[in-house]
Image: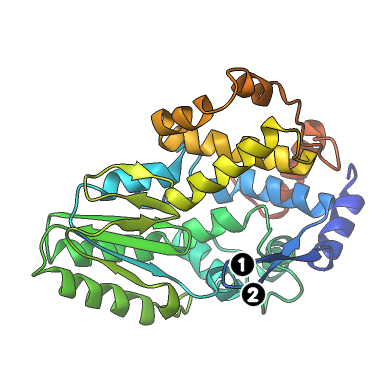
Amino acid sequence: MKTRTEILNAIEKAPYSYRKSFIPKRNGTQREINAPSEETKELQKAFSKILLIKLPVSDYARAFIPRLSNPVKTTCEEHRKFNYTISVDIKNFFPAIKPRDVNNCFQRNGISFNTDQWEMVRKITFRGNGSRGIPMGSVCGPIISNAIMHDFDMNLFHKIQSITNSFCFTRYGDDIIISCNSGKTFPSIIRTLYHQIHHNKSPKFRLNKAKTALFFKGQVRKIHGLFIGTDGRITIGGRKKRKLDIMLCKFSKNQLSIAEQISLQGKLAFAKNIEPYSIQKLLDKYDAGLSEELNKLNITHASSKEYNEAELVKICEFLQNELEIVV
């Protein structure tokens, strides 16, 4: 995409350029993923760079925040100091975010588009006519969702603060977690959270009751797939450790495929970051050179199209002019 005509053509095609795929969920159902084409990805990168990153994000957002190297561990560290925790999930979070919600977000932040400009924004950010919400797989979806949730986060924080000063609130995408130290104020916090979700005007949300979890004093808590023990220690859990043990055993016997080796390398890196001492003990069960062999694996993730910085700059300049964005 070098000329104005080529960029305009790419924008026109963008809503219909997604490739649908499905990945299995833990409950046995399938999660629909809609990955944009390389051209649409470049449009979304440019749009994120010139405008979306300028929108405010609350201090309570933990997902898609560049400064957080391990947001899941960070979240657990924040909540482990408290005794009572509620964890809830917003049902169909990305599909719930419609074009009108994105436009409302821009207007709340003093950004207005004329009809033609808004059509351009909609085509870049949404699949089809946008009726199915933000596509899961969109480059700019995570940034849009955090910007849209800014007011939700701030309102919820201040409402809980009116109940107690001793609490912790974080949101990881569609997962909201609140912890406190008082069993007396815990029910009020729960009611406040439910009310905030059900009465949010833009976007309209629904609670995923199947994923709501309450944890009380003296219980092991599960947060974003990690466990906080009664002693405050954060672990990946016994089941994941046993799976790692099995994979390491197979690796030591050359019984893993390349794909399984990639998976093992990623799982080990994550586990070491969470609990380095116990994972090292697990590795020590095997040959002393096993860790070295794993580190030597030459695994590269090839992109289907080489990143072109000059091309991205051209798209940024085009969008700045068309959308009248002041840099």
Marks 2 and 1, Cα distance to the nearest angstrom? 5 Å
Foreground pick, 18 / 177: 177
Q: Is residue 137 left or right of residue 204?
A: right
Q: Tell me where residue 110 appears, x and y as whole percent.
A: 47, 59
Q: Is residue 27 above or below residue 317?
A: below
**The residue tagged with tag 1: helix, strand or loop?**
loop
For the question of whether residue 58 can be seen, the reply is no
**Residue at 70% over, 21% down:** 296
Residue identifier under label 2: 29
Residue identifier under label 1: 25
Label 2 is placed on what type of residue? Thr
Q: Splitting the image into 4 quarters, where does residue 169 fall?
A: bottom left
Q: Tell me where residue 239 appears, x and y as whole percent.
A: 48, 52
The quadrant in which the C terminus is found is top right
**Residue at 57% over, 51% down:** 52
For the question of whether residue 10 can be seen, the reply is yes
- Say how the picture is coloured: rainbow
Q: In this view, does 7 lie above or below 206?
A: above
Query: 10 Å neighbourhood of mark 1: few (<14), some, or many (≥20)?
Result: few
Foreground pick, 126 / 86: 86
Q: Is residue 213 above or below residue 270?
A: below
Q: Is residue 215 left or right of residue 210?
A: left
Q: Tell me where residue 205 appears, x and y as whole percent.
A: 45, 78
**Residue at 60% over, 43% down:** 246
Label 1 is placed on what type of residue? Lys
